[in-house]
Amino acid sequence: MEEKQFDVYQFIGFILIAMILTWMFFRNENSSSQNIQSVESNTSLEVDSSSNNKNYEKSKFNGTATYQEKDVSITYGIFSSWLEAKKVEELVIENKDIKIVVSSKGANLSLVNLKQFSNHIDQPLNLISENNHIINTSIKTRLGLLIETKNIYFNSFKKEENNKSQSLVFRANISESQFLEFKYTLPNEGYKFNFEIRSEGLENILSSDDIILNWQTDLFRNSKSIDYESRYTQLTYAYEEDKVDNLSLSGEDEEVENKVRWISYRQHFFSSILIPNKVIKEVSFKSKDLTVNEDLDKRYTKELNSSFTLDRKNGNILSKMNFYFGPTDYQILKSYGDSLETSVPLGWGIFGWINRFIFLPLFAWLATFLPYGIAIIVLTIIVRLVMSPVVYKSYVSQIKMKTLKPEIEEITKKYKKDAVKKQQETMSLYGKAGVNPMSGCIPALIQLPIFYALFSFFPVAFELRQKSFLWADDLSSYDSIFELPFSIPFYGDHISLFPILASAAIFVYTLMTTGQQSMPQQEGMPNMKFIIYMMPLMMLLFFNNYASGLSLYYFISNTLTILLMLVIKNFIIKEDKIRAQIAENKKKPRKVGGFSERLQKAMEAAEAQKKINQNRRK
């Protein structure tokens, strides 16, 4: 077989063709850019220079056998046509819940509007608009050309409809049998829709390198307090079987996770969730807090980013997934399956269980026939009645401790310099009187899970969003009664009334409880009364920007507790009888056992060891 000789003229011809195609590409791009509002200044079509050093064999491209030089020029020319600036078209699909607009440039979502909702300034609630969202796929050819789909002007697009759904199909065609396609399919109702990326006839063009999809969104502010909204705006993801994790709420954070089942960009009360049809082997996550950037005028809360490899079949792209753009509502998310409801931060462990199985269904039931503010009050009453036995035991313990207070102070004064002996005598007094010093702490510990569960529940209760009660126009946000002309650190630029009422109720409750207890001042220890009195102040500062529904709960809860304690004191418990019982207990010989016995023996052993050490020093 005759060896093919190098033809310098042919080589020069190939170079000229490449130069002409390049010149035509840039000429068309510049002339067409005047017909649209903006055109990318940098091309996403790049050539890997290392490919020029490779010895490519003949390859079949578009029906023609060519060599490397011709492959580069023709491939460059065909793909550059995808990037020629054209008039941008936008197609719309919608149902009663959601409106979706897709642009022919990049086949990207240019608008996602939730039709049933509005933002904090009564404007349409758009999760996507003004170029805050992008889906970009990086594709590399065998000859080293890099194409980013965000810059492609898709040259074929259409809308399809049937009885169950509407679809938008965008194609970047090379020929009838060679194309890249993006397809969006929206059912006739709901917030979840299908998204598919596929290619046809490009198996001999695409490289074997991974094809990476990048999903990035700058999340809009939708609430009055951007700082409060940012506390509940987070990238959350599910991986492996039933594990859920998230990135940091503040600053910048990055993470790489395997076997990812879905990715949620939670925007406090609204979420954008990507659900792949198959588990993604590996995803790179990034999160950046934008609330600290004053240049953005606080329009956005977070910038979230996820990157992962698309599936392929026989060399072509074939990747299917679903998107959910809608409310962060526990019941709605649960109805779509895939455990999407676990993206709602209801608390970990027992706190989450209490919310899921008690407070969520109970509050949902109350809200079916009561205004939301009244539903919170009724829920609070139910919780207080259920916890009333605990309040009763706590109050009885306080009276007992108050009765023993003079004797405890006497012991403290007598054994001021001997801590061990003082502790022994104090425990002995408790034993004789039949008083358990831990009985005052146990009721508080029992109430702690309820306290924390409700603390997690109210800020994420979607039902409270934009629901008014009394002077509060939105129970999911703060209830401002006066706007300040300045901002106070840790407090804000407004005055909320419900936190003031809740703080006052806590202060009264504190006065009532501390008056019943023995609280001797220990050397080297801070003043406990001062610390307790700090609680109302901390409540006032911390909850000024929190959901008014939560402050309403604490106000009603503490008010009911005060009333309950007054009822117990005046109509149920007789302090004289408790004092008489303590006096009677002191007269009776009492067998010490269990924890008290072990504690007594430990203290005696410590006292004996102390005496031994003192004798050795002598």
Image (cartoon, rainbow, N blue to C red):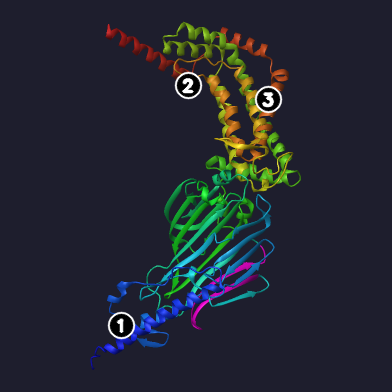
In the image, 149 versus 560, the foreground residue is 149
Assess disc 1: are there few (<14), some (14-19) or many (≥20) residues with their C-alpha within 10 Å of its C-alpha: few
Q: Position of residue 563 (x, y in %)?
A: 71, 25
Q: Earlier in the sequence, mark 2 or mark 3?
A: 3
Residue under pointer 2: 595
Q: Earlier in the sequence, mark 1 or mark 2?
A: 1
Assess disc 2: are there few (<14), some (14-19) or many (≥20) residues with their C-alpha within 10 Å of its C-alpha: few
The answer to whether any part of residue 191 appears in the image is: no
Count of numbered circles on the image? 3
Q: Is residue 560 magenta?
A: no
Left or right of 326 in this view: 21 = left
Residue under pointer 3: 562
Q: Calculate the distance from the C-alpha at mark 1 to the C-alpha at mark 2.
A: 85 Å
Left or right of 136 in this view: 125 = right
Looking at the rendered image, the disc whose residue lies closer to the viewer, 1 or 2, is 1
Decide: is 410 above or below 115: above
Assess disc 3: are there few (<14), some (14-19) or many (≥20) residues with their C-alpha within 10 Å of its C-alpha: some
Residue under pointer 1: 57
Q: Calculate the distance from the C-alpha at mark 1 to the C-alpha at mark 3.
A: 88 Å
Decide: is 182 above or below 425: below
